[in-house]
Amino acid sequence: MLVASCASVLKPAVTTDVTRVKAGDYALDTAHASVVFHINHLGFSTYTGRFEAFDASLSGDATHPADARVEAVIDMTSLDVANDVFATELMGPGWFDAASFPQAVFRSTSVTMTSDTTADVAGDLTLHGVTAPIVLKATFNGAAFDPLRGAQVAGFSATTDIDRTQFGVSKYAGLLTDTVSIAIEAEFLKKDPD
């Protein structure tokens, strides 16, 4: 009984009403976030990898969603494909060339609401030394005050497809598919308490 009552007190009252998101600056809770990519491997399987080190920030006001800004930085040397030898190869000069280009950076340029809880977040992605526009298909999962973290939290999921050859990652182009699907999960914590 005590456990159940504690759980009900600690469980956040998450809402998907975007107008209830507190305005301000938010920092990524990296313990509750992920950046995963998928690429078709010769038609046999969908190969999956992830990056373990990244950071992001979000700022804005729900009453003016078009003015929201997102910036994210990925440490390319943090690649995890569950195979250290292959990860080293992928970080090498034939692929990501992480020694020369240790970071990928995304900076939003516009946010267009597509429904009450979804938006197209357009921005510039710099990867492998090349900057090109992409669009993240973002879903607002909800927001609330989280008593466990003592902060206002806003959660999002986002997906996008990129053409790796557009960014100069062209090894085996046409043999391996050139389309890379990226899936992002992110929880942001409001920096300043209300």
Image (cartoon, rainbow, N blue to C red):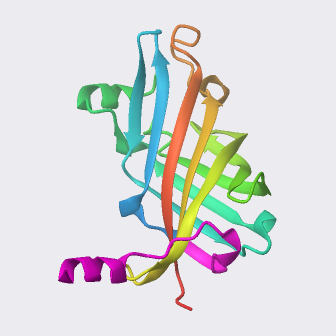
**Residue 93, position in %: x, y?**
45, 27
Query: Depth check: 177 or 99 in front?
Result: 177
In-image side of 103 versus 82 (left or right): right
**Residue 163, position in %: x, y?**
64, 26
x 39%, y 83%: residue = 147
- Magenta extent: 1-26
x 51%, y 16%: residue = 171
Query: Depth check: 60 or 20 in front?
Result: 20
- Residue 25: in magenta span: yes
- In the displayed structure, 184 sits above or below 14; it is above
x 55%, y 16%: residue = 177
Q: Is residue 84 visible?
A: yes
Q: Looking at the figure, which quarter contains the N terminus?
A: bottom left
- In the displayed structure, 134 sits above or below 62; it is above
Q: Is residue 148 visible?
A: no
x 49%, y 39%: residue = 100
**Residue 21, position in %: x, y?**
63, 75
In-image side of 4 versus 25 (left or right): left
- In the displayed structure, 131 sits above or below 175; it is below
